[in-house]
Image (tube, helix red, strand yellow):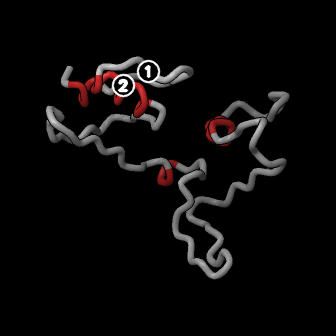
Amino acid sequence: MERGTVPDNGLTRAVLNNYNAARSGNIYVVFNPGWFINDLDGLSVAVVHGSPWRYDTYVPILFAGSGIEPQKVSRRVHTVDVALTLATVIGTRPPSGAAGEVLLEVVGQ
């Protein structure tokens, strides 16, 4: 993955999004869709929130506070959008190295 010698397709792009050269291991296991390690040290696992399959990438992001109107956003957003959105809501500079985009629905635009 570090050398970029993996095929360019949706699956490998999703795996690369979870990869960090300084912290990731040497092996990345991709289970078939809908398959999990059912017994992990006595714990039953039903989702992993890290697999590359679309059903495992839908995780709610909630914002609540004064001036934030209730609503549902049905477009694709990313967890990296949270820091920029929060910085905009409270009127401060975003964290250095922040990525993503401001969720305009949250800030009322």
- Indicate left or right for 53 with 78 as reference: right
The residue singled out by tag 2 in the image is 87
- Indicate left or right for 84 with 62 as reference: right
Q: Disc 2 residue type? A: Ala
- Indicate left or right for 27 with 79 as reference: right
Tag 2 secondary structure:
helix
Q: Nearer the viewer, residue 61 or 93?
A: 93
| Residue at horizontal 75 percent and vertical 44 percent from the top | 24
| Residue at horizontal 27 percent and vertical 37 percent from the top | 73
| Residue at horizontal 84 percent and vertical 48 percent from the top | 26
Question: Does the residue at mark 1 contact the one at mark 2 (Cβ under 8 Å)?
Answer: yes
| Residue at horizontal 59 percent and vertical 59 percent from the top | 33
Note whether 108 is above or below 16 in the view shown: above
Q: Disc 1 residue type? A: Pro
Residue 88 x/y as whole percent: 32, 22
Q: Nearer the viewer, residue 14 or 24?
A: 24
Residue 70 x/y as whole percent: 15, 41
- Residue 94, disc: 1
Tag 1 secondary structure:
loop
Image quarter where the C terminus lies is top left
Q: Quadrant of residue 63?
A: top left
Task: Using a 10 Å C-alpha cutoff, classify the residue at mark 1 as few (fewer than 14 neighbours), some (14 to 19) or many (20 or more).
Answer: some
Note whether 77 is above or below 42 in the view shown: above
Looking at the image, the residue that sits furthest to the bottom is 42
- Residue 43, disc: none
Residue 50 x/y as whole percent: 58, 51
